[in-house]
Amino acid sequence: MLDKTKRYLYLVADARVRNPDLGLERIVELAIEGGVNIVQYRDKLNDSRQFYDQALRLKKICEYYGVPFIINDRVDIALATQADGVHIGQGDLPLEKVRPIAGNMLVGYSVKTREQARWGEEYDADYLGAGTVFTTSSKSDAGQAIGLDGLRQVVEAVDIPVIAIGGINESNVAECMRTGVSGIAVISAITLASDPREAAEALARVVFAEGGS
């Protein structure tokens, strides 16, 4: 389980959403140097072999920096690459089936409501990804934004760490942290930045500050 006493700046590295002048490996490396302390790889574009090969390259970077590496959706890829964890959503394999398969891996679970959050806690998710908090174009299946009130309801419903995701950037990260989340997850705020290290540093200053402000 993620440590609820710690703060997390969580990068979702998406094969489709990145600065075209930088490779995904370079973006991840710069982001970690800027303060990212957990990385998820998401790939809705490539076939399984390409997903696997890219995952191995990103995992190697994360291992070098001592940062947990998570695979989005694909339990098989997570197992094959010996990733640190897998993150699943409402439309993926059911959490209660994934947990036994995943063994000692971290299992993250995407939620929007208090009821989904409680289900995630009941079936041993290690952390919850709550959102989308704000409207975002980085995730085509994000659905309606839950807002800060919805985020706060999720946080208050469970005792496991909650990571906010969806439309989060330097202008609203402090508001998210003040809801009591353990951290925030971002995609484009870092991956589309001209300088991913600088973008991560700006977010990290808020995420890791006392009180999230």
Image (cartoon, helix red, strand yellow):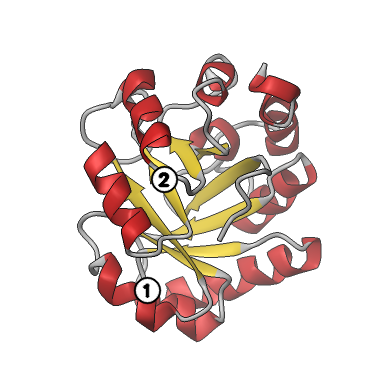
Residue 136 picture location, percent across and down:
35, 29
Quarter of the figure with the N terminus? bottom right
Residue drawn at x 75%, y 41% as measured from the top left:
35
Residue 19 seen in the figure? yes
Residue that numbered label 2 is attached to: 129
The crowding category of the residue bearing disc 2, from other C-alpha atoms within 10 Å (few below 14, some 14 to 19, many at least 20), is many
Q: Where 151 sits versus 104, above or below?
A: above
Give the vertical position of 87 relative to 20 (above or below). Answer: below
Q: Which image quarter holds the C terminus?
A: top right
- Does the image show residue 76? no
Could you say whether the residue bearing mark 1 is in a helix, strand or loop? helix
Q: Which residue is mark 1?
A: 99
Q: Amino acid at mark 1?
A: Arg
Q: Residue at x 30, y 48 (%)?
A: 118
Q: Residue at left 48%, top 59%? A: 126
Percent coordinates x, y for residue 180 in the rendering: 53, 28
Q: Circles 1 and 2: CB distance less than 8 Å?
A: no
User: Whole-percent x and y of residue 17?
Assistant: 45, 44
Which residue is drawn at the image coordinates 79% and 67% (left, top)? 64
Amino acid on which disc 2 is placed: Gly
Name the image quarter holding residue 120: bottom left
Q: 159 or 132: nearer the eye?
A: 159
> Which is closer to the viewer, label 1 or label 2?
1
Q: Is residue 59 left or right of residue 98?
A: right
Image position of 205 (left or right of 21): right
The first of marks 1 and 2 along the sequence is 1
